[in-house]
Amino acid sequence: MAVANVSYLRTPGGERASGKNRTRLSASPRRFGKGPVAAVGFVVVVVAVVAVGAIVLASAKASLTTDPTALAKVGMPLGGGSIQSVTVVSGSTNAPVPVTIRGGKIWPRTLIPANQKISVYLIIKRPGWISWAAGKTERLHLSFTAPVASLRSHYITVSGHAPVTLRFKAPIQEYAYGTAAHLTRHLLSSPQSVLTLPRTASAGTIDVQAAPMTWETSKRAAVSWFPATGAATAVASPAPGTSIKPSTPITLTFSKPIKQALGSHMPPVSPTTAGTWHELNSHAIIFRPQGYGYGLGTTVNIPLPNGIRVVGAKAATASWTIPAGSTVRLQQMLALLGYLPQKFHYKGAGVGLTYADQEEAAIKPPAGRFTWRYPNTPSWLTSDWQPGSFGEITKGALMAFEDNNGMTADGIAGPQVWQALMSAVIHHQRYSFGYTVVDVSEGSPESESTWHNGKTVASGPVNTGIPATPTATGTFAVFEHAPSVTMEGTNADGSHYDDPGVPDVSYFNGGDALHGFIRASYGSPQSDGCVEMPYGEAAQVYPFTPIGTIVHVT
């Protein structure tokens, strides 16, 4: 008997159903719509959607990176976007840096010092279609340090007529070279690590600036080159034989380390100058003068030991010259101090009260004007005066200054005189005596009129020289002033005279002097060239005729 194949459902407990609870399963085909394969497909779709979303979200992010040429580079999100704002600051104070954006790159509109910290803050506005998921804006921040160009050596030996070759540790894109005051900037067409510069002398020192980026500035670095010889040589800056200021520092750079070239002693500087030597690095020293410095109108000499030659020096000793002060500035200072019958008025702020400022003014006088201190100044005095001309009036004022300051009253503006004048101006040491001129007339009768600070303080008859020994006419400064002297010499007739105790003497031209002398009469030529006065008159004149007083004989 045939038996049918029957499938039974099992109860949840696993037992077969029996009796009328048995149910026969249908033998029709099964449906797979909600089976395991469909579930796997759904998962794949979900994963794909999530991956696409992740890619979209990732693509919605902008980027901010450094750039080999510009300050920074901006990468925009997928589908576009816009830069809402960009802020760049630099340095320890976060100083703002103005920038411009070109082709997705940020460029500074001003030069930034090398080795300075730079921070870039960027806000990007995302496109609207993605802003609902990624946000409307994105903030980016980038910090870095501006790169630095470094030389492999600052001391170069050059053979023959070869150029000066500079080698850098990393490529540079811009450079400048020359003197500190005249550096010309150059841009390279492509980054380079080796730079060739023209050579104008067998040895020398130049200032060099170089930077890896075109938007940078860099500090000056001194580069020295030397001839290829075995002996030590030195390069001086400023160059020997040139004119320098009294306060100019002098730098010596040696082809060998300082200790090998000089040993333990620094070279002497003459004239003896307040100041000190300082080591700049292993090869260079600098002398920095202090106070008055080398002095005006001097020659500075620096000899070097051990046969070391300063390139460009004409002798074993390197020398520099200091310009003398100008006559105009000498007159300005004498007027400011009260030694001249003029006042001086600066045009502008005037001159600073330091030696450096005064020395600068001595070489290059400031603008201004002179005015007469007294309304009744004698006409011959105003006509004899000329700014910039070193006449007897200026000489007399200078002699008065020298005498008043314990110096030899020779009327020569040497270095010590200039220093004393500057000190007096700096410390406002005005001359309180005033200004005197003695006007001697060889008319008939002969007379004198002593004029002091705008007033006639003495006048009377005098005796000048006889025709054989006349009193010279002209303008002269008193160079010796004594209350009593012994006068001796030879008369016109060949006889000898010896007159002790001559009172109130003021010599103004060789042996000619103002003084007291007893004569039977006064007012006519009777002397051997002097201007003789009665004792009482001479006593009145004498206090007003110190060294430097102007005597005018007509």
Image (cartoon, rainbow, N blue to C red):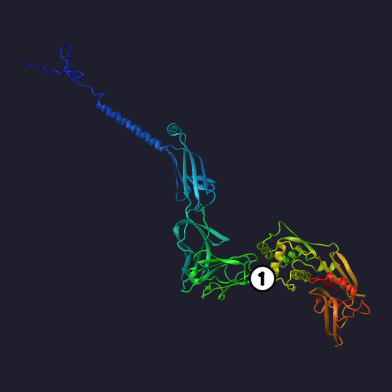
Q: Residue at x 86, y 83 (%)?
A: 468
Q: How many marks?
A: 1
What percent of the width, then of the height, locates residue 161? 48, 70
Query: Camera-side residue: 339 or 242?
Result: 339
> On the rendered structure, is 50 left or right of 546?
left
Can the viewer see residue 521? Answer: yes
Q: Quadrant of the N terminus?
A: top left
In the rendered structure, the answer to whether residue 273 lies left or right of residue 461 reads left
Left or right of 436 on screen, residue 126: left
* Relative image position of residue 510 (x, y in whole percent): 80, 79
Q: Judge whether 528 appears above or below 337 on screen.
A: below
Percent across and percent down for residue 201 are 52, 70
- Residue depicted at x 20% and y 19%: 13
Residue most extreme to the right: 520
The reply to whether residue 447 is visible in this rendering is no
The amino acid beneath tag 1 is Gly
> Which class describes the residues within 10 Å of circle 1: few (<14), some (14-19), or many (20+)?
some
Q: Residue furthest left?
A: 1
Is disc 1 placed on a helix, strand or loop? loop
Classify the position of the C terminus by image quarter: bottom right
Q: Residue tagged by mark 1?
A: 297
Pick out the residue farthest to the bottom. Answer: 494
* Frontmost residue, 148 versus 519: 519
Q: Nearer the viewer, residue 32 or 482?
A: 482
Picture coordinates of residue 511, whole percent (x, y):
81, 79
